[in-house]
Amino acid sequence: MAVLSQRMTQRGNSQAIRDSRGDRIFSFFNYLFLSIILIAVLYPLVYVLAASFSEPAAVTAGEVVLWPVRPTLIGYQKIFEHPTILSGFVNSVFYSVVGSIVNVVMTLLAAYPLSRNDLPGRRILGVLFFFPLLFNGGLIPFFLVVRDLGLLNSRLALIIPVALSTWNLMIAISFFRSSIPEELLEAAQLDGANDIQYLLRVVLPLSGPIIAVLFLFYGVWHWNQYFYALIFLSSKDMFPLQLVMREILVFNQLDLSMLSDIKQMAIQQGLKEQLKFTVLVVSSLPVMMIYPLVQKYFVTGITLGAVKG
């Protein structure tokens, strides 16, 4: 009897928590909407990848839809035959690694003191840090400062002037305030630790998520950066990969006066279109390969370091 009563109770509970018709309709349209968003975001990526492996004539004719048409590696062959592609890749790795290290160190050194309530003049320093976020002199004064510092046509021109991002500083400050208890500082002071020892031995070991997030943000920014390289650098030996890719596309323009054969002109036009997709794949692939390795830190760091009102 008791068993029968228990089964009836379980059946009643399952019926009680069963979704209503309105809930099922809402779930259906919700999944449908999310599926449409997923397709809208994913399809361009799949199309670019398929076009980069397709025959140039198929790309020009619009035959590529989802899968590569008459697969070929001619686009990648032409890209890697460019004399500066390897140096551009090495330069981008240098700017991303060294620049990110400088950025993260500067951000942590600024964020931790500003997160402390006992810092003298904290509000004034905060205003000085965040004022350029709203007001700045513009591109020409920025260029003149870099020139007067003697950084033009040097690798430091892409690292020193952009050593700190105010947005990332705000995220780091919020993380320290919300995730590092003040009791840890009191305990460390009772043990005789000074501020530097507390930062190195207590704060930084607990800040792995936000450090990973900062490296991701700064690394992606440096990897995709080409504009500052365009205005600060004149030596092609220092060009990052993005600027080299731009050079490939710019100098691959079709010159009708040099082409008397219509068939050859069509081949060149198709190759030009395919190079656009190949450039996108080559420049995006390293970041897409690294992102899954730091995804868990990315989600955790953004959640804990989010600016709270």
Image (tube, grey):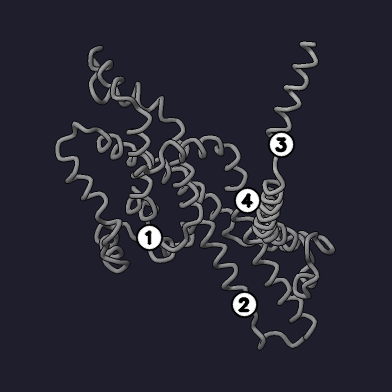
| Other residues around mark 4 within 10 Å, as few (<14) / some (14–19) / many (≥20) | few
Q: Nearer the viewer, mark 2 or mark 3?
A: 3
The residue tagged 3 is 18
Q: Whole-percent x and y of residue 86?
A: 58, 53
Q: Quadrant of residue 63?
A: bottom right
Of helix, strand and loop, which one carries label 2? loop
Q: Whole-percent x and y of residue 77?
A: 71, 60
Above or below, 84 against 198 in this view is below
The residue tagged 2 is 253
Of helix, strand and loop, which one carries label 4? helix
Q: Amino acid at mark 4?
A: Leu
Residue lying at 67% horizontally and 64% vertically, measured from the top left = 277
The residue tagged 1 is 153
Q: Earlier in the sequence, mark 1 or mark 3?
A: 3
Q: Amino acid at mark 3?
A: Arg
Q: Quadrant of residue 290?
A: top right
Q: Earlier in the sequence, mark 4 or mark 1?
A: 1
Q: Earlier in the sequence, mark 3 or mark 4?
A: 3
Left or right: 265 as drawn, with respect to 83: right
| Other residues around mark 3 within 10 Å, as few (<14) / some (14–19) / many (≥20) | few
| Other residues around mark 1 within 10 Å, as few (<14) / some (14–19) / many (≥20) | some
